[in-house]
Amino acid sequence: MKKVAFITGAGGYIGGETAVTLAKSGICVAVCDISEDAVQRTVDRIVEAGGIAKGYVADVTDSQSVDKVINCAAEDFGRLDMMIHVAGGSARIAGGKYVPLVEQEDYVIDRVLKVNLYGAFYASRAAARIMIRQGDGGKIINFSSAVGINGLKNCTDYAAAKGGVMSLTKALAKELGPYKINVNSVAPGVVMRPEEDGGSDRALKTNLLGEKCTAQDIADLVAFLVSDKAKFITGQTYVIDGGRTLSMKGTD
Ligand SMILES: NC(=O)c1ccc[n+]([C@@H]2O[C@H](COP(=O)([O-])OP(=O)(O)OC[C@H]3O[C@@H](n4cnc5c(N)ncnc54)[C@H](O)[C@@H]3O)[C@@H](O)[C@H]2O)c1
């Protein structure tokens, strides 16, 4: 029987690459994003690559919508084996500014915490309910960030949300261990987009290896964590940042 993964933020850079990578390995992918166009683009990429995918539009800050699409996907595909909450981002996703906390506005703090952290709660809860009912385990992965470990000025909302994801991971792994559900999180450093090629050198300077991290690097880590090879790994945050978090100065 084919395995089924539900991925939020699957219309984005890292989520899209993760969705395509899992689909290429034979996993059926429920592609979820707030943007209908972005959902369609990823579904098309998967179908072109010979994979199986179906699109779902939802705002992860709305728990009822999250319940609805995750239940719907499990029904459409007949089961649910993996939930990967990739949707997230810093002040930009709220249309806000990167400013010190003393200048930050309520709507930015609210949105950033809700998409990154509440989204992880809602999607993990909906997926866990189904996985517990199925009775044969599962994998839950939420996205954290190197910023959640070291902090970053003008990004307190994002840092706190991503730190929360790491704590959620540990506590939820304890709750779901008896059901053989592995709960982990992934904490990237700076992931370079193709359009940044030759432009910003920030992605090269913020790691010890002097290499660019791509969405494929992150997708490969997720593919490992949802595989049977990672069956004894739970409650962990996997940092994938080329050593950025070792810097004495913090994230930069
Ligand atoms: N890109 C990086 O350098 C980097 C570094 C560390 C962590 N991360 C984390 O990785 C994840 C993916 O980042 P990315 O660079 O691919 O970002 P991205 O902006 O390309 O993708 C994020 C996706 O989430 C979707 N989204 C936003 N709000 C949503 C909502 N309320 N409901 C549902 N979907 C929503 C967006 O439409 C978008 O498609 C995020 O959680 C981000 O915080 C990224």
Image (spheres, rainbow, N blue to C red):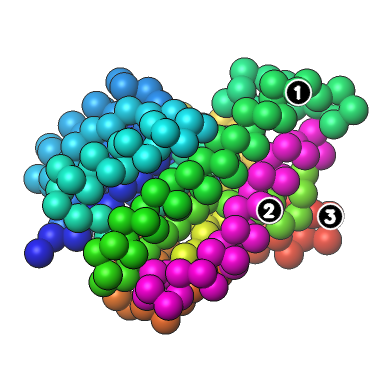
- Residue 3 screen position, x and y as percent: 19, 60
Q: Magenta residues: mostly which secondary structure? A: helix
- Indicate which disc residue 163 carries: 2
Specify whether residue 152 is painted magenta.
Answer: no
State the extent of the magenta-drawn residues as a range. 153-182
Give the SS element for disc 3: loop
- Mark nearest the camera among 3 and 1 is 1
Residue positioned most to the top? 95
- Residue 38 screen position, x and y as percent: 33, 26
> From mark 2 to mark 1, how far is it between C-alphas?
19 Å
- Residue 250 screen position, x and y as percent: 79, 54
Of labels 2 and 3, earlier in sequence is 2
Residue type at the position of mark 2: Gly
Q: Which residue is mark 1?
A: 106
> From mark 3 to mark 1, how far is it between C-alphas?
29 Å
- Indicate which disc residue 249 carries: 3
- Mark nearest the camera among 2 and 1 is 1
Of labels 3 and 1, earlier in sequence is 1
